[in-house]
Structures are given as structure tokens and as C-alpha cells.
Image: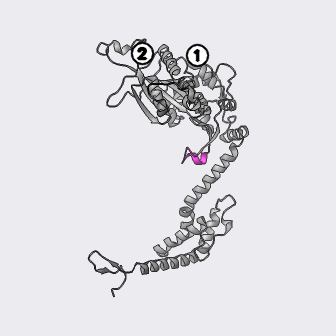
Amino acid sequence: MGGQVFATGPDPLSTPRMSPEMYRAVRDQCQEKLRQHFVVVAVPIEGPAKQSFGDIDIFVAWDRREVFPSSAPKTAIDESQQSSIQSIYQALGSVRHKQPNEDSASMAIPWPESFPPPEEANEGSNASKKYYIQVDVHIYRSLEELQWMLFKHAHGDFWNLLGSIVRPYGLTADDTGFHIRIPEIEELNKKEARVLLSKDPADVLKFLGLRFDSQQWEEPFACEEDVFEYVATCPLFYVKDKTKDEDTVGGDENEIEDNKKKLKANDRRRMASRPIFRKWVEEFLPACRASGRFMASTTTLPTRSNVHQQVFEYFPGAQSIYESRLLKWRVKRQHETLWKAVIKPAIPTDIDMHQRSCCATALKKIILQGDTSFDGIEAPPSLKDDSGIFDEEAVRTWVVDNWDTVSAVAWRINNERCAAKKANTGTKRTLSGIEKTPPGEDAA
């Protein structure tokens, strides 16, 4: 999305921005052509009062050849041998295309003769230059997925604004749905930290306290301010009251800079590339603060924990999935750290280095893997609870009390294994035909 897919490379194409009139005309033509191939064809609701468009995004689902085989259009090319993407190329008259994955593609189609070329074509030497329109088509396997994506990409930067509000509370919307994040996990694995709550736009809007009983999700907002006001109706939105230290000379400029500093890296990038998001931070938030709207103090703000509890009450089953994944993560992480952080340090360092290493490896197997091959030595069940979480102090104590016994057994087993291996190796015949005795053995 953005209209720059074909603008670079060895043979770039010019895909200038389109006027609203041209965008809507070409968009509608493309949809009409694609409806011959797909049962469902839709586009996201436009951003407010857009003056130009860089590309056209179209979402489709249910290939007619699969749903209604007998109704599929017949063409010169046997469509039964074409993929859905190839059918799209042909239907839209693509002159060049790029396919990042099997379910989406970007196409360059000719600039229509019925619309004048962009203004740059009037600069003399560019009069004969060819221009194109970028069309991005996305194929979805279910109506649920398509509906969610229409919601996620509706109103332009809507979710950039709303995301900046809900993200501090551990909530995230991405292309797969609305999620709650597990803080202990997200620092190391953002994907694993997300627990899906819903793919139903109505459910998400209800939870976030946003109305959808009128035209909010049927047509574009009239202006950017209308989007701001709508987003601000979310109960989680607030403007923090100034402290005495913040109420200084240069207030507005200081506030804007303070707002920017509090943004996450992704939001700072949005400030640079998304004009509406920049206006939200630089104009709407300071204006609310100056007029005393949506004010909240640190004592009245909901906490992340409060919001999580609301999530668990609203979305049935979310809490059990959340807690199960968190427990599984804690067990896994503890297994990764227990040996180095607890078991190994509890073994004295004033013993032979090789013997100490052998002992540490044996203790790791006995405690973490339940290995009983070291003369039946077992770690007591009391070292961990029913959920699998170890009591690290109990592990440390048991290692201190038993390392010498484990070490003696492990060292003996290691020496026996080495001796057996050495005996089985015997003498080996070299390429020269001379028998070579393995190192450490006397020649006969």
C-alpha cells in the first residue's frame, strides 16, 4: 500500500498520485472486473477528505471457479489452469506485477486515456511519458478474514491513532485480529506474546467503547477532526494533566516535544510518514490539554492490570489461554536458565575442571530431564510444583548436598564409556597398508 512498488529498480514505472475523481472511477472499474472472478470484492473505507491517492487496494474472497464452477467466465485462456492471482492479472490488464506471497499482488495498469495525465506531464519533455496506476489485490480465504481487514484498514490512519491509545494497556490490533499481550513474553518474542481475543469488528468496537450505530463504518469521515473526535470517545483515551514542573515557559512547544518523546519507535516513524498521525500528536492532543478536555490524573487512570481484567471478563476463554501460555513460557525460560544460573554455580570451583563439567552435565539431566541413568539417582519431586516451576532455592540446596555423589557416579560412567570406546576402536589400517595404533596405546 502506498503506490511506490514499481517506482524503483532497473526499469522503474511512473505511478503518480491520483485525484479523488480518478481514483474512484478506476477503483470501481477494477471492482467490476474482479466481480466476474470473485464472489466478494470490497475496498476499505477511505481516509477523511483525501486530496489524492497513491494506489488502489482491493480485497477479494471466494474464487467463483471454486464456489460456482459452472458460472465462471470463459476466456481465451483456460482459467482452470490459472491461479487466482493469474486471473487477476488478466482481468485488470496488468503490464507488470510483483507477488510478495500467494495471496496478494501489486500490479501496474495503464493510466486511463479518459483522464488527463498528471501535472508533471505538462513540463514539456514529459509529454510523451507513460504513466501507470498501482493496484494491490489481496485474496482472503474466509469472509471473516476479509471483514477484519476491511475494518483494520478503514478510515486511513484510524488504527494508528487508536493503537497509540490502547497499546500501553497491552492491547494490539494487527492483520490477524485484536490481541492482548503478555508482558513477560513480549520483550523476547512479540508474536508469542499475543493472545487473540477477536476477529469480529463489532466485538472489538463494543469492548473499546466506540459507537457504530450510525454512519461511522459505512462512509468516510468528513474531515480529520471528526476522526480525532471519534477515536477520543474510547474510554481508555486521556490527556494527562500538567504537573507543576511541566507548567513552564514555552508550554505548547514543550508539550509537543514531551508527547513525541513518549512515543514508541513505531509511532515516531508514523510521525514522519503519516500526516494525520502527526497532526494528532502536534495539534489535537495539545488542544485537548489546553481546553481541559479528556483530562486525567495518575490517580484516576486505569492500570494495565485493570484493563486485562476487563478483557478477561469480556472475552470468554481468553484468561485460560493467557495463563496457560504464560506458564508454558515460564517453564521453558526457567529450563533455559536454571542450569547456568542455579545448578552450575552451586558446584564448587576448586575441583578438576573436566570432572566439574561432567558433574554439571549430569545434574542438568537428573534435575531438568528426570534422567535416572546415573545409578538411579533422582531429583526429589519437591524441587518443583505441580505446574512444573522449580523452587530455585530448593534446587540450589539439593545440588550443594548431592553434587559430590553425582560427581563420583558421573565421572565413573564417563571413564567407563571412554574406555569402552577406546577398546572398540582397536587398530585401523591406513591407506599405506600400515596398521596405526590409536593414540594412548602401546604398539604390540
> Which residue in the protein does label 2 denote?
112
Q: Check the image and report above or below for 378 versus 119.
A: below
Q: Check the image and report above or below for 190 versus 15.
A: below
**Residue pictured at 35% horizontal, 19% vertical:** 130
Q: Residues within 10 Å of mark 2 (few under 14, many from 20)?
A: some
Horizontal and vertical percent position of residue 22: 47, 15
Spatial separation of the CA atoms under disc 1 and disc 2:
28 Å
Q: Is residue 188 left or right of residue 312?
A: left
> Which residue in the protein does label 1 denote?
222
Q: Is residue 189 magenta?
A: yes
Earlier residue among tags 1 and 2: 2
Q: Residues within 10 Å of mark 1 (few under 14, many from 20)?
A: few
Label 1's element?
A: loop
Q: Check the image and report above or below for 139 versus 55.
A: below
As rendered, which of 147 and 364 lies closer to the eye? 147
To which quarter of the image does residue 39 belong? top right
**Residue pictured at 53% horizontal, 36% vertical:** 264
- Name which residue type carries label 2: Pro
